[in-house]
Amino acid sequence: AVLGLVEPDAGRIRLLGLEIPAQARAARARVGVVPQSDALDPDFTVAENLIVFGRYFGLSRATIERRLDALLDFAGLAHKRQAKIHELSGGMRRRLTLARALVNDPEVLFLDEPTTGLDPQARHLIWERLKRLLSRGKTIVLTTHFMEEAERLCDRLAIVDRGRLIATGSPQALIASEIEAQVVEVSGDGATDWARARGDALAARTELVGETAFLYCSQGDAPAARLAAEAGLRVLRRPANLEDVFLKLTGRELRD
């Protein structure tokens, strides 16, 4: 709806000061989109994919070719300039899709789960590239199920559950306002029994998930960690994070 591809059910949309969908074509010329699926043309080389996509924006071939070196360097694909798409790894294809979305030098970039299915090295490389774009003053609108990704990249985020907006704010503000400061994860034989017997006295809130107990503690010293270790259980103590917030607000049950 934001790009004017479907009619909104209600409300009013303005993108870069333009009314959507009435001025959607003009708005789309100023944005870049990284879809969930790469949709690169397998018949073209890496460079040709960028050139053809740039032509969709009415850019001259000379203009696009002047931008090619910078785009390929940004994507870490200068050495793959003449490679066909089937020769690229999944991470390379994802980086090429990101470079393709930048061919028109957009003011706003929309990304739909940009690192899904990537290995940790490729994911971290894309995060570094996105941070570079933010430092250049680009606006990025990102959808993701990776809470670490949201916590690393977002200045402001919205948590949506079953199509309903349930929380907004910076990652740090949501962690501070929605969850206890410390999390103690307790596992091993008898961990859930131990948590049922001791959890209420040691934690503000306790969740049992399989054979693991999560104790959410407001106390800075989190004595639950010491007492669980003394009971011979495996213990992981850590600061609360955005994933804890997400699970608290949306629940732990599977979503199909």
Image: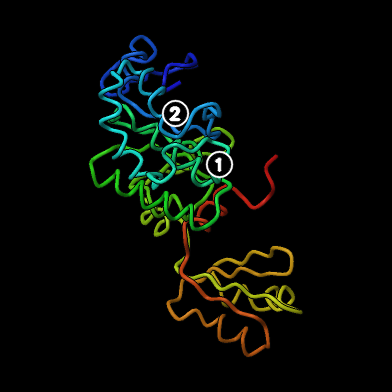
Q: Which residue is mark 1?
A: 87
- Give the structural element (helix, strand or loop) at label 2: helix
At label 1, which amino acid type do we have?
Glu
Could you tell me which residue is drawn at 36 percent across and 40 percent down?
72
When asked about the image quadrant of residue 221, the answer is: bottom left
Q: Secondary structure at mark 1?
A: helix
Q: For marks 2 and 1, give the one nearer the viewer.
A: 1
Measured as percent of width and height from the top left, residue 231 is found at 67, 88
Give whichever of 235, 91 is nearer the camera.
Answer: 91
- Quarter of the image where the C terminus is located: top right
Q: Which mark is residue 49?
A: 2
Q: Is residue 218 above or below residue 35?
A: below
Percent of width and height locating residue 78: 37, 44
Residue 147 rendering spot, x and y as whole percentages: 49, 52
| Badge 1 density bin: few <14, some 14–19, many ≥20, Cα 10 Å | few
Is 21 situated above or below 246? above
Q: Are marks 2 and 1 in contact (CB under 8 Å)?
A: no
- Dot 2 surroundings within 10 Å: few (below 14), some, or many (20 or more)? many
Q: Which mark is residue 136?
A: none
Q: Is residue 230 left or right of residue 27?
A: right
Q: Residue furthest left?
A: 136
Q: Earlier in the sequence, mark 2 or mark 1?
A: 2
Which residue does the image show at 25% across and 31% down from the upper left?
66
Question: What is the quadrant of residue 95 in the picture?
Answer: top left
Check the image and report above or below for 214 versus 120. Answer: below
Q: Residue at x 28, y 32 (%)?
A: 67
Q: Give how far across and how far down residue 11 sits, in percent.
A: 41, 18
Residue at the far front in the pictured view: 82
